[in-house]
Image (cartoon, helix red, strand yellow):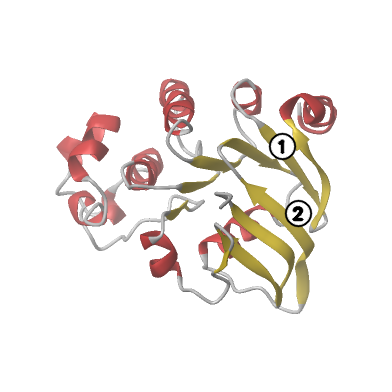
Amino acid sequence: MEKLLEATKILFEKNSRRILDLVDFKLEKGITLVVGPNASGKSSLLKVLAGVYKPKSGKVLLDGKDITNLPPSTRLNLGVVLAPERMKVALSLSVEENLRFANVQKAYEIFPELRKLEKRKGKDLSGGERQMLVLARAFSTNARYLLLDEPFQGLHSELRKRVVEKIEELSNLCAVAIVTHDEIEEILSIVDSVYVLVGGKVAFSGSKDEGEEIIRKMFL
């Protein structure tokens, strides 16, 4: 059986506005970069894959099985892991408590900076510290399909470099999808495939080599 996370003919609306318009998407082994203008549906696509949003029509398939109606918690147990945008952590919980469903020691190995903050509440963390926590939580799970929504938000240049290296390392173990406006140049050097979304539609999908010229014209 082919191993992939797939969305077929996804139609998603929010507040009566069409966000995703019959989108087809496949996440296979390696790294897939998803780019597009603001409000093009990139983050919504990841949330549909993770079960945070339910499409009006279309299907989400995991290794050929329909998971469209499964909740995020079940998808997480199946290896579909979302690192959400905007540094979303549980503000009332400590760093250690935020990592309770992940491998805590592995998380601290990835971001040693978090160890000294383990008792600090999410609400008391800086933006960069919250983003480290979001990524540590995602990177230290047993992900089969890792969905990274703006993973570089709030991080300084050295941390961004470390995140790129970690993504490349993890891509040997799982399939990775990245939505980002930042570090596109660096990410392009390690991605395998590219999707460009415009107005909720797939304007381009193909290999990195095929999509690089389009990305450079539109976003670099």
Q: Which is closer to the viewer, label 1 or label 2?
A: 1
SS state under label 1: strand
Residue linked to disc 1: 194
Report if residue 111 is visible in the image.
no
Residue that numbered label 2 is attached to:
40
Q: Where is residue 109 in the image (x, y as percent from the top left)?
A: 23, 31
Q: In the drawing, what numbered circle is on residue 116?
A: none
Q: Where is residue 26 in the image (x, y as percent from the top left)?
A: 66, 50
When asked about the image quadrant of residue 115, the answer is top left
Front residue (pair 142, 184): 142
Residue 30 lies, in percent from the top left, at 56, 34
186 or 2: nearer the eye?
Answer: 2
Task: Tell me whether circle 1 and circle 2 mark residues in contact (CB < 8 Å).
Answer: no
Q: Which of 156 and 150 is in front in this view?
A: 150
Quarter where residue 188 is shown: top right
Above or below, 168 against 180 in this view is above
* Residue 214 as seen in the image, left or right of residue 67: right
216 over 34 or under it: above or below: above
Q: Disc 2 marks which amino acid? A: Ser
Residue drawn at x 46%, y 22% is: 161
The image position of residue 64, as x and y in percent, is 59, 61
Give the mark nearest the N terminus, 1 or 2. Answer: 2
Q: In screen coordinates, is 164 left or right of 197?
A: left
**Helix, strand or loop at disc 2?**
loop
